[in-house]
Amino acid sequence: MVSEPVPNTNDINTTNLDVYTNVMQGKVLFNGNQSLPKVAWNQIKILVISNKHEFDIERDMLVTETLPKLQQYFLTQGIYVYFIDWNLNWDFDSSKNPYHILRYMKEMQHAYETSSGLFLLTFVGNKYGQIVLPIELSVMDFNNIKNSATDLGKDVKLLERWYLLDDRSSPSVYKLKDPDENFINLSSRSLSTYDLNTHENFEWNEAYINLVDLFLNVVHEKSNSKTLHDIPLLSGVEMLFNFSTKLSSSGSICVVRQLDGLTEKSKGNECYIDLLPGGRLDKIRQEKLKRFRELLTNKLSTNDTNDFKTEDNLTILNIPWKDSGDFQSNDSDYQRYLRTLNASIFLRIKSLNERFLDITLPNHFKLSQQILYNETLVHLTYYSKLLPTTCLGFEHFVEQNYSFKQWLTLANTSEHYPYMIFGSRASGKTLLCTKIVQYLLNTIGKNAQCIVRYLNLTSRSRHIGEVFSSICSQISSLQNVSIEPNEQSNNRIESYQSILKNQSKNQKPLILMIDGIEEITPQSQYIPSMTIYQTLLQLLPPKVYVILSVSRSIHSSSSSDVQIREMIDRIEKENCLIELPFTKLNSLQQNLTDSILQILSKSIYQQLDKQSQIFYLLRLILNETYLNYLSQERKKFDSINFHLDEILNAYIDHCEQKFGPKICSFIFNYISSSQSAISEIELLDILSCNNEFFLEYFPRDLPKYLRFPPSLWIAIKHVLGPLLTEKYFDLKVMICWSHSFIRRHMKQRYLKRVEDIRIAHRDISNYFLEAFIESKPLIEMNRNVQIRGDSGRRFLLQQPLLYSETAYNYRRLGELWYQLMHSGDIDRLKEYTLCCFEYLLSKIHGLSIEQLLWEFDIICSNILDVDVLLIQATLKKIANIVSEDPMLLAGEITLRLKNIKSRYNEHIESLYVQAHEWCESCGSPVFVPLSSWISTIPPMTITILPCPDGVFKIIPTTFNQHVFCATRQHDIAMYHIPSKKLVKKFTSHAASITSIRLTYNNKYLVSASTDRTIKLFNLNSGDLENTYNIHQDEILCMTVSHNNEHIITGSRDRLIVVLRLETGEVEHSVEQHTDAVTAVAITQDDGILVSASRDQTIKRWTFRGMQLLDIIDTVGSPIRHMIISTDDTFIIAACDDTSVQVKSLVTGSDIHRLEGHSAEVTSLALSQDSVCCYVGCSNSHVYAYNFRSRLLLRTLTHHESAVTDLYVSADNCFLFSAAENAIHVLNVKQQFNGFPNDESLPSSIPTTALSISREGDVAIAGSADGIVRLFNLIDGELTEQSVDHRAPVTQVALSHSYLFSLSGSKDTTVKVFDNEMGEIVTEFTAHSAPISHLRILEDNRKILSGDEQNYIKTWWANTGELIDSYNVPCKMLAVSPDGKYVVSGNGDNILKIWSLDDARVVRSIDHTEGKITCMAFRADSQYLVTGGEDCSCKLWELSSGKLTQVLVEHEQSITAVAIGEDGKYVLTGDKEGQAILWLFKDGTVVYKLLRHKTAIVCVSLTTDGTIAITASHDGLLSVWSTITGIYIATFHFNHNLVKLNISPNGGRYAAILQNTSCVAMLSLFNISSNDASKLAQRHSQMFSDTTNMILPIKPKPLLYPKDANILTNSRHSSKTDQIVADTVLVGFRFLSYEFIFSSQLESKLLLTQIINRKLIIDMFDSCMLRISMLDILVLFSRKISMNVSCR
């Protein structure tokens, strides 16, 4: 893909082009936020507000009907949709707490800024609702209210209690105490605080009612007082609605529902109308409601744009009131109203989003331009968000900092270094960088261009490599220079430096800011971070201003690059570097007047050098949460200790106190466990699947819908405050901890236990795997709760791998692997990511192979798994191939796994099958290997664990993730193998440890020592559980029974002891050996115990009863080590004389000895399949033997000192070897365990001849050892093999219809093989020289053969009888398709055309300036084309030898030619890799096919001429459309290509490759001649930069929302609806049910149009509602009309 720097102005309107250009150049920063375009976020966040309980049914509909349909519709575009309903599962009426209203205003502001379209949905009914108390009152207002209330006889004590004078404000005000802070348990809902919560709620409710009553009475009675009119006393709904219209009237919609007939006397009206105590109508509130309704239209009429219509965002619906409020469940009018409402909301949200995208997003730009535009705009938006923040000391810095002034002066005129800001995390680097950029823009002027990047702010700025690539693309747009996204890093660096010089030369100032280089990661061979960083530190040309903020830690470590350290030193010497925090803050000191700030200032100066995060700490301390915490704890500012952990704990403690520790832990754990960040809807969805939350938060009655309360999240988010920040991934807003040290703190506090870590990651991975997308049961027997089926539905956003055929789910791609890895579920990690073909292809195509390999590196540093290592090794081998064309992934996986898949776990087999199935279904041409000539062999050494304390005995855990080793300090160290981290030390022994074992249930670690003790450690707790002291001498060996009940030991005092594992009770103590017992082993069934001793004997015992069965006394040397095979068949003993002897465990007889080593044997290990035996020796070598054949397979020399222990993993994949100070982990899966070679033939015997049948279903191959093989080209299987020739085979051929096959050899014979009978029927021996040519003539009966002495003979295939013999030059030879003509030559520039019937020479043809190199016939045998070293191709008339055309366009020697069977095209290829497609009739060049870089070996055209095939010497095979000239498929053989045979239809391929004896066989899937042009177009859409790039994977259907209960109920309640005429699908833009047509005639006309289906909206576009004719008739009969608009 090529990233065009500037869009084509012919396709894009001027406005969009200007917007694009201004964003790319940073010009939008000069006019503040007003000129900054809004980001087209991939999310729609909608706040839903209404009075408590008044719209319960409507809000239920939003959850169950509207939201699932919205999510389903928008998810195909990759857009998240979610509602923040302030009443959902929230017991508190937020209108009663004005501080909650402030939170919702802040939340609304956020929704407005980060939503694409609608951000507020308001429901207004017959009830005005609760009045919001004023938070602040001026002193005058307070006194007026107090005096007026006193005059009215009201008690003002409540007013005085809740409104306190705040003298810190200027001017002083009376401020309402926050009820949440005044009542500690007001927000807590756990069972332990439930009663307190209820009591405090009641207390505040009483206070609220009295305060509101006081305010309303005072304002109403004193209505003439002007000052009191300034106190609005609005409802929460009206206040929030008014706030929304100030943000944007177009983004807020309002539904007004009028219940006709509802009065204060109606039954069940409490939730639907304002009433006073005693049931009287509250006239004050009803009057406010009337005014609010009147103002709604005016509020919405403040248009954002001229095309905005008020009525579009206002829906007025009238329905009749039914007494007791029970009408909702069975009333047809109400059901119809809900259906109407549902459709109205859906369509309005959809249209607002479309309108928003039309305004904000340049839809006509190419995909890469859209990505770059959005990435740039997000960073600019974040820059603008930071600008209003005060940067303490910045004015002093600008005015007084000499180094900055010097740098700026130098940068204007001369070469200079970038300006660098050093500091630790949270030291203020980001804000300072932002302020410096603003200062430079103001100083340099509007001629400057600006690029800003904040590292790790977005998913495309996670590391310096991604940021640099993005910057290069952006600066290229400044000068209309094209940079390819996949361009090599060196080329990008050169382009970057060149463009900067051009900017400087053209006097165009450029400001470049990169913030947050905290680590030069990833340290990977695929992403050259170090080189990029070095580039950024180099000298800059004048007028280029680069500001970098960097963490000092990346240079202070010993591993940092020396060259970079030297560059930093030079920059520091040039005074181009400052370090935070500042040492002078004069401006701050001068502005301090408040006593609290003075105390803080003093603390700041005292701790400035101690606390690098001092300004972040200041932000934490001045936050409302911390102030409330101090107030509750009754602490003073002068007692504050500026310790980060203490302040963080204060926030957490305050949060736990308000909401409960368990609730907080759920939220904190999910945020901490996300890879980088998590979106709000993801967090709410995951919390909604947490059953423990519902049982904790709802201790009495569970809610109707199991959804996490959004208001609870908003409250917790408010308390956390500055601990949280935002990031932006895939244009979605994500939340995370604001700094890594906060995340670390949270993990240390809440995620101490491994189980808690795994649960958090498991929950997140389940969400992205859609495990509970339909339902999740909630069962708690203690509370008699059983929620199943639909009742357990959580209404989750779906997370498919693909949103649509043009959009990947980057959230799932980026998060799932990380979550599964940390959940410890390796099987699911492999199943859904690492061994999932569609996942791998999505990752490579949607991101990059480099990103995928980097993630594999991370995974392999966390888990050890043989399947993962295999896939990693495979991807590394094919990285260069698939980075150019991801479509090749399936073929490469098939090729490399075909021969080895059966030897691995089922995940590898599954990956192979998935790759093959994808090839069949992808719809695009793709090559599929039928044979395998390359198998992936992962590197043998996986990792080396350094053990500074030494290592003597080792035992890995069952799943190979950890290893225990005995050290020279007599400890047992536990290491995590992939990360090499020391996890724990088990200390207790006083002398050398001689043996360590794990029980088979992984519950205990058992160790034995020369201190005569046995230690039993509990692995769950890590504690020492028991110590057994039963021996009087040193314990030399120990093992554990398979049933985990017994420990068996052998000691220097000749004893064998069997004791109970958990109690230490000795069951048997046997002394039968005459010397020290050195080894004990037990059979798999715990039936036989085997012991070995230095008395040179091996003894067999019954384990139960310890009866001696027999003695093996033929060893002949003291035994050092002894093991038994896992099949309980063999005993292997290593002796003092260095011998390794194999005995029969059953009979005790000698089997054989393993010979090949000479040093002292120090350890033994046997593979679990009893195939491979490993012998460790004192000479540091490990000898790998085939245990059964005694063959020494390999000598491993990776250690530098004596091998101390060996162990083979339970899955036979890994060999653990220990020596002195290191443990080596080796991958032995494919090294010694009997894996087959790539082919049955040794690789040293090459394939020398190859041909395929005319039908393309069979291939025949001959090799240098005389073997001839037949292959089925349908599946690549070998069907026949014969060894007949005494010398290498030189020629092979297959007859039509597969009747017989031929093989010619250097032994001068030609043999005819009957393929049906399976035997040789004829042997032709008339040649006296090696066979050089072999052809089956057209009649399928005659054979033409030629030899190296220039004799050509024709003979009968069935008898071998000679027909004719010719002596003509035949180094080159070809026979026309009709068998009439032979063209032959001596390999020079001349060929002769002669008749096969009479040997008459028709004519000699030639190329005058070089040898003829290739030739081909047309299918009708009328024409011949030749190619030569003179770079020309010539077309000859075969019957006359007449030259008809000369094709001259190549610049190198011609190496291959072909003529299409239809005679339309000629295809040629040359020595430098250029292929040309010509028109046969006139020699016009149709296309130049430029892809190959080495000599073309083969060219071919399919039967119908729509497909051209080219292959080059380097093994690249390409398939082209002759219609479009676009390549549609490609394949890399990964070996040099010697010969290629292609079936006529282009579907089957067979090749001879260098350096391998295998026959490479391929099939080209999905190649239909009729669809060649379509295939070319589809391939172009997949891999060219279009607006909507077609993905190579087909998306799976989204899960449809379940049938709407509304629709279902209405169908049951009104059967007539189903009987009436055809149902009409209607999409509505509703105006008002109150609008009445002016005449009956007008009504009839509209109804007639509807019935005639002239006003039907495309339902698949609007995705909505079925409304029957009966519905419409009922609406009109009730005089309720609809405005139905058409598109």
Image (cartoon, rainbow, N blue to C red):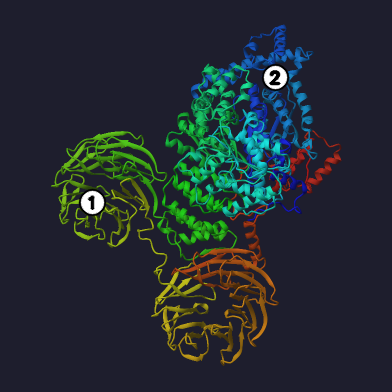
Above or below, comparing residue 1289 to residue 115 in the picture: below
Q: Is residue 1600 left or right of residue 693?
A: right
Element on which disc 1 rests? strand
- Report the disc number at residue 275: 2
Q: Provide the residue designation for mark 1.
A: 1122
Amino acid type of the residue that numbered disc 2 sits on in the rendered structure: Leu
Instruction: Determine crowd level at label 2: few under 14, some 14-19, many 20+ residues with C-alpha closer than 10 A.
Output: many
Q: Is residue 231 left or right of residue 643?
A: right
Q: Is residue 654 left or right of residue 869?
A: right
Whether residue 1598 can be seen here: no
Is disc 2 in contact with disc 1, using a CB cutoff of under 8 Å?
Answer: no
Above or below, comparing residue 1210 to residue 1568 in the picture: above
Q: Quadrant of the N terminus?
A: bottom right
Instruction: Determine crowd level at label 1: few under 14, some 14-19, many 20+ residues with C-alpha closer than 10 A.
Output: many
Where residue 1101 appears, as percent x and y from the top left, is 18, 48
Where residue 1225 appears, as percent x and y from the top left, is 37, 50
Element on which disc 2 rests? loop
Who's the residue at 61% across and 90% down the image? 1402
Amino acid type of the residue that numbered disc 1 sits on in the rendered structure: Met
In three-dimensional space, the C-alpha distance between marks 2 and 1, rounded to whole angstroms, equals 91 Å
- Based on the displayed image, in which of its 4 quarters is residue 512 positioned? top right
In front: 794, or 14? 14
Where residue 35 appears, as percent x and y from the top left, is 73, 38
- Report the disc number at residue 1378: none
Who's the residue at 62% across and 57% down the image? 1583
